[in-house]
Image: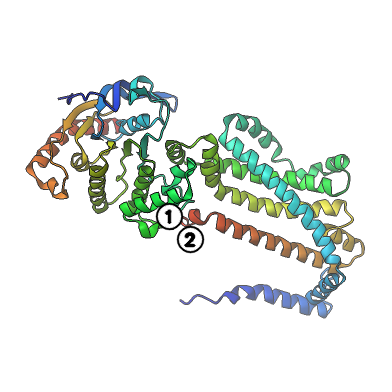
Amino acid sequence: MTGAAPAAGAVIAVRNLGKTFTRDGRRVEAMRGFDLKIAEGEFVTVVGPSGCGKSTFLHMVGGFEPVTEGELLVDGRKVRGPGPDRGVVFQEFALFPWRTVAENVTWALEIAGRPRAERDAVAERLLAKVGLTQFRQHYPAELSGGMKQRVAIARTLAFDPRILLMDEPFGALDAQNRELMQEDLQVLWNETRKTVLFITHDIDEAIYLADRVVVFTARPGRVKADVRIDLPRPRAIEIKKSTAYTAYRNRIWDLLRDEVLLARREEG
Amino acid sequence: MARPPRWVGALVPLLLVAVWEIAARRGDAPEYLPAPSVILAELGALVASGDLFVHAAASLYRALGAFAIGAVTGAAVGLAAGTLRAVERFYEPIISLTYPVPKIAALPIVFAWFGLGDVSKIVIITISVFYPIYIAAFFGAKGTSRVHVWAARNMGAGRWQIFRRIVLPSALPQLFNGLRVGLALSFIVMVVAELVASQRGLGYLIAFSEEQTRFDIMYAAILTIGVLGFAADRVLLAVRRRALKGQLLATAEAR
């Protein structure tokens, strides 16, 4: 089941990656030795039961959590910390509440000392792209969850990272907004074709967006299956009703079911 | 039910003042409770002679000067301790040990060191004000959201930029609570220090009026302290509202 075609010149390359951390004096093995390769321009989604370490994996690629076992390479170099080559979109949005929407979007440019005119132009372009032009002077607290996540995505696109790391970005949204955001993201990705690592617990979302769906096992998490999604692009949302889509859905759910049950038993 | 108009809140205090006034005029009130009208008249006389401004200026100079020093040092050390482990390990035990000690107990020592002038008063007020501001800044910095720091690092921010642009604004709501406590404390300690030893200031005016058994002057001085403290607090709250504009929108205060 495991092992889609390993891509030559992978942007993200993982070898025998493991992660152990200490919680309340107890050693917890979050992940255990797995391999994964993500090629330039690929959209890879990761699904797995809760607590399987899929978010931890993204945090490691982002450079926030240290690697404790194995190897994690981005562009052939060991990850030593965060960097603007890997733009992260967090589940909690992580917008700065003391700054307006436009000031959030241009934060990275301001840090880099870019001139005002350039920042204004970038804010205008990206806010138009995510449909929030009229909200540029608002504060995050005045926005809905879906709007906040669009600002967060615009903020990440503002520094033009090669790789997008998205940690359950639509997890906090209601079902309708989530579907709309999936569509928007798909359109956006078709324009830019950035490499994307996208964590989710939503199988529909995982299939709809991805070139490959990676299924994680229950803790300690590792790659259980790597499913290539051969659905034509651009994908309309109606593709979720197609027989090919349903077949993927059933297959991935079958793979996931045992792991979810296992994770549940451990929690109980 | 309709909301009662705002003046309703003033009804009880006004009634009390009226009872006080009548009782004092009829001679039913003790000597230490002169009529409000007498107090206001004395206040007017103090304003007219310019004496009140001399004393108020001396007091404000000490209280606000010390508050400013205490605010800057308290915030700086508190933020540093909340950000850097080494600073925290150094300061936390010292703070724990010295915080419960009443600073005013050190007044004789401070007088012995710095004399009876303005410096000793500013020193004792600064020390008193430092603590609540330090503690607010410390916990404010500690409360910085991890994901905000991660987002900032992701966008290429260095340590100093994270401190200035993430930790500082994150700590600001808490810090303002500490500043507010510190500001009130600066007035309290100012009066106490002036009561003990001074030739000028509103605290001195109270001590002086006690010697002269002029209770009208005493109340005028207390009233002035209250009004100045109130005004200072209002200014601080206005600054806070501006500084925390975006952050307050997410709180119950926005409604």
Secondary element at tag 1 = helix
* Identity of the residue furthest to the right in this view: B212
Residue B150, by quadrant, is top left
**Residue B188, image x and y in percent?**
75, 54
**B193, A133: nearer the viewer:** A133
Disc 1: which residue = A141
Residue A58, by quadrant, is top left
Position of A233 compared to B215: left or right? left
Quadrant (top left/top right/bottom left/bottom right) for the N terminus of chain A? top left
* B130, above or below B10, in the image: above
Chain where mark 1 sits: A
Amino acid at dot 2:
Ala
The answer to whether residue B78 is visible is yes
Residue at position x 23%, y 41% in the image: A202
**Residue A198, image x and y in percent?**
28, 37
Q: On residue B254, which mark appears?
A: 2
Q: On residue B18, which mark appears?
A: none
How far apart are the alpha carbons under marks 2 and 1? 10 Å
Quadrant (top left/top right/bottom left/bottom right) for the C terminus of chain A? top left
* B59, above or below B17, in the image: above
